[in-house]
């Protein structure tokens, strides 16, 4: 299905672009959340007039993302977990655990925007957080033994 993006979406496209996505993704996720509209004749003709509104909204999102990046860059988290005597964890640190730590700090970040890699040992790690478009932040997480 051809759609016009109203906001930039990771791995789909930038605001104002006409892209092709699967029908279910468009009908069940993008359109109900007002992230996109169907790229029919009328909407394509009105695209030029809508581009000003879309770009203004996109600029606002970028400003908000930059402000959030400044806040997140200052954050250093500590997580206490069960570990063996050699410093190996009994499990892997997940995106949800990092998201929960960030919620305690007052930041609501979606799990899929957190890039942890495999954390299976004690130590200090840098975790990337995708905020919006090309804006991302790096936070430091210290994993300590309980």
Image (spheres, rainbow, N blue to C red):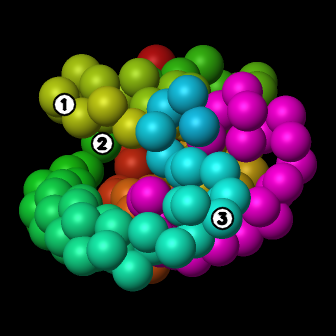
State whether residue 55 is above or below residue 110: below
For the point 74% across and 51% down, the residue is 118
Residue 88, which numbered label? none
Q: Magenta residues, as a range?
A: 1-30
66 vs 70, nearest the viewer:
66
- In the picture provided, is 51 more to the left or to the right than 59? right
- Check disc 2 and report its element: helix, strand or loop: strand
Q: Are marks 1 and 3 in contact (CB under 8 Å)?
A: no
In whole angstroms, how far apart are the C-alphas of marks 2 and 3? 50 Å
For the point 49% across and 46% down, the residue is 35
For the point 72% across and 27% down, the residue is 28
Q: Are marks 1 and 2 in contact (CB under 8 Å)?
A: yes
* Residue located beneath label 2 in the image: 77
* Quadrant assignment for the N terminus: bottom right
- In the picture provided, is 62 more to the left or to the right than 19? left
In whole angstroms, how far apart are the C-alphas of marks 1 and 2? 9 Å
- Check disc 3 and report its element: helix, strand or loop: helix
Mark 2 surroundings: few (<14), some (14-19) or many (≥20) residues within 10 A: some
Image location of residue 14, percent across then percent down: 52, 74
Would you say residue 68 is visible in this rendering?
yes
- Check disc 1 and report its element: helix, strand or loop: loop
For the point 65% across and 51% down, the residue is 38
* Residue located beneath label 3 in the image: 41
* Residue located beneath label 1 in the image: 105
Mark 3 surroundings: few (<14), some (14-19) or many (≥20) residues within 10 A: few
Q: Which of pointers 1 and 3 lies earlier in the amino acid sequence?
A: 3
Q: Is residue 2 magenta?
A: yes
């Amino acid at each position: 299905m051809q759609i016009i993006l109203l906001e930039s979406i990771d791995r789909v496209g930038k605001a104002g672009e006409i892209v092709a996505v699967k029908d279910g993704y468009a009908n069940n996720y993008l359109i109900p959340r007002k992230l996109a509209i169907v790229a029919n004749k009328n909407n394509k003709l009105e695209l030029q007039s809508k581009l000003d509104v879309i770009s203004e909204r996109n600029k606002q999102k970028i400003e908000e993302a930059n402000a959030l990046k400044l806040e997140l860059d200052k954050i250093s988290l500590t997580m206490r977990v069960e570990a063996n005597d050699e410093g190996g964890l009994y499990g892997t640190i997940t995106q949800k655990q990092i998201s929960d730590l960030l919620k305690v700090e007052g930041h609501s970040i979606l799990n899929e925007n957190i890039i942890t890699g495999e954390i299976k040992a004690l130590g200090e790690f840098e975790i990337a957080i995708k905020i919006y478009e090309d804006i991302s932040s790096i936070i430091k997480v210290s994993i300590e033994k309980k």
